[in-house]
Amino acid sequence: MARDPASLQTAASKVRFLGTARSGTQDTWHLRVTSIALVPLTIAFVWLVLSLVGKDYAGVRATLGQPFPALLMLLFILTGVSHMKVGMQAIIDDYVHDTHLKDWSMMANLFFSVCVGLACVYAVLKISFI
Amino acid sequence: MTFCRVDRQSAQAFLEQPVILPPRVRHMSNFRTESTLLCGIVWISGSRSNSKQGEFKPMAEVDLRPGSAESRRPLSPHLQIYRPMLTMMMSIAHRITGAALYVGTLLLAWFLIAAATGPDAFAIAAGFLNSIIGKLILFGFTWALFHHLLGGIRHIIWDAGYGFTHPEREYLAQATLIGGIVLTLLAWIIAYIVF
């Protein structure tokens, strides 16, 4: 198996285009794309929250039951949860090095993001349809 | 992403520290220069017998198992040496605000589920958010949101290739900091006017 001893790349990695991290730049790109989407979505979310200030139970349900506020909220939640999951994974990669703690942290991050995202989406849909 | 300036005096002090290395790698002391950051790429293996510099061996052949002689290699200086700068602080603040927002989504989930459940649950959630401590948490959450938003825009500007040179990166950092505070105050003033 001929391998240039001065090169840090193994033959297999040259074929697979990946290094020892075993994954490429998907996470970085995902963060960039979700960030760009979140710029208008966050401004819209803040505007929506400001419109909810001072409203009582019926008022909040009426606002969130309309199609555009509900859609904005859903888009913001889904994009935000995806962004936060990848971002927290980057934090875990930087600070957690013990193998088992890293695995459990990765799972905790995934489960937290999915639960919070699903809970928010369920609440918005419930307000819209019931 | 950002460049840190090393204080000349502390760099001098760092370089003048005695270098204690195991015998097999003692020739590494010749390479303890300001380009230490690049020294991980090749490894110099010296031997005790010959006095001239050893040959280079690739990092793949270095024994880095914990406890081996070669694993005790000199590392790049870190927080002990770099003078704190605004761009450094902004970088870690971006990460901290991101983590704070991560936890803060629980607040959003609580509010939405309370609104979906019924008037009693909503009264508890709204009562907490209208209390002093609730408003304090919301204010902090709003600031974290705007700061992280503007920091994200700053990162996108960098990704496009602009703003790396000397005055621009400082202006971007200051704009993010001041803009975050201004937007937070603006949002809360609007909320009070509406309410």
Image (spheres, coloured by chain):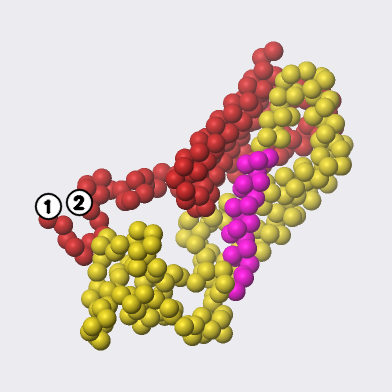
Q: Nearer the viewer, residue B41 or A55?
A: B41
Question: Residue A62: where, in percent of width, then height?
Answer: 76, 21
Q: Nearer the viewer, residue A88 or B116?
A: A88
* Chain letter belonging to callout 2: A
Amino acid carrying label 2: it is: Ala
Question: Residue A69: where, in percent of width, then height?
Answer: 68, 28
Q: Quadrant of residue B89?
A: bottom right
Question: What shade does chain A have?
Answer: red
Side (left or right) of B31 relative to B5: left
Tag shown at residue A1: 1
Q: From what the image shows, is residue B122 above or below residue A28?
A: above
Amino acid carrying label 1: it is: Met
Q: CA distance from mark 1 to mark 2?
A: 9 Å
Q: Which chain is yellow?
A: B
Q: For mark 2, give the secondary structure.
A: helix
Q: Residue at x 74, y 55 (%)?
A: B181
Q: For mark 1, give the secondary structure.
A: loop
Q: From what the image shows, is residue B138 above or below residue B17?
A: above
Region of the chain picked out in magenta, as a range: B83-104
Question: Residue B132: where, in percent of width, then height?
Answer: 87, 42
Side (left or right) of B5 relative to B105: left
